[in-house]
Amino acid sequence: SPVIGVFALQGDVREHLHALRSAGADAVPVRRPGELAAVDGMVVPGGESTTMSRLSTVFELLDPIRERIADGMPVYGSCAGMIMLAGTVLDGRPDQESFGGIDMVVRRNAFGRQVDSFETDLVFNGVDGDPVHAVFIRAPWVESTGPDVEILARVSGGPADGRIVAVRQGNLLATSFHPELTGDLRVHGLFVEMVLRGLREPGLRGRGTTDE
Ligand code: GLN
């Protein structure tokens, strides 16, 4: 089975490790560059993106993660993880860094105080069957996307009607919400499939070789 890391300097790491294992992956925490080098793909969990930014700089993971993303490593970011995959972050700290990789503008804490946390059902392109029950916790939304970004889900109804909450660009997947908290393994299953495909396709080596 593929080896999928979970960025483990901050966030709901255990929940993602559990969901990945249940979806058939070999899941390991990633806290240092050597651990990053040994994974075929990575999840960036929910948590606090300003802290993730600061700690990934301190623990010298920021540039190695950017390089793995540039090499084609599949990455899935949920909530704070979505923010970390955004090319542009609105309402972040002035010095906030992201890994980038997805050509999108993301707004932190976008749903506002009135709807700090909420749950809703989403039609999710690429996930078959029933709608996905989505849990949002001080979540970001995607304000705009570039031409290569595929929009997978939007909120339907309520004050945030139409807002983009799931996207994919190549090997990068991001959701505003937390599928690791609901026991629905379909989004993690989709990501495990992306990692397996990355391993099969020449030139998209999971374990980060650039010369191909
Ligand atoms: N508000 C957090 C941030 O800006 C994200 C919240 C979450 O991951 N549940 O990073």
Image (spheres, rainbow, N blue to C red):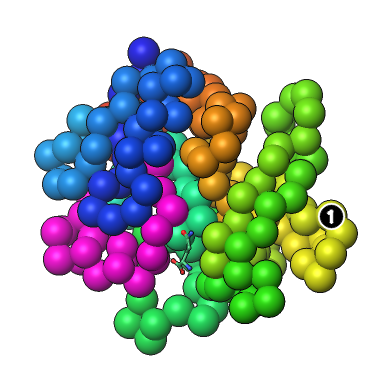
- Percent x, y for residue 163? 75, 63
Camera-nearest residue between 68 and 34: 34
Give the residue number, with chain letter if any, for mark 1. Answer: 156
58 drawn magenta:
yes
- Name the residue at the bottom extreme: 94
Q: Is residue 69 above or below residue 143?
A: above
Q: Is residue 7 above or below residue 158?
A: above
Corner quadrant of residue 93: bottom left
- Name the residue at the right extreme: 157
Q: Is residue 188 above or below residue 139?
A: above
Q: Is residue 202 in sight in this rendering?
A: no
Camera-nearest residue between 207 and 76: 76
- Percent x, y for residue 81? 44, 54
Q: Residues within 10 Å of mark 1 (few under 14, many from 20)?
A: some
Corner quadrant of residue 14: top left
Helix, strand or loop at mark 1: loop
Magenta-drawn segment: 43-64
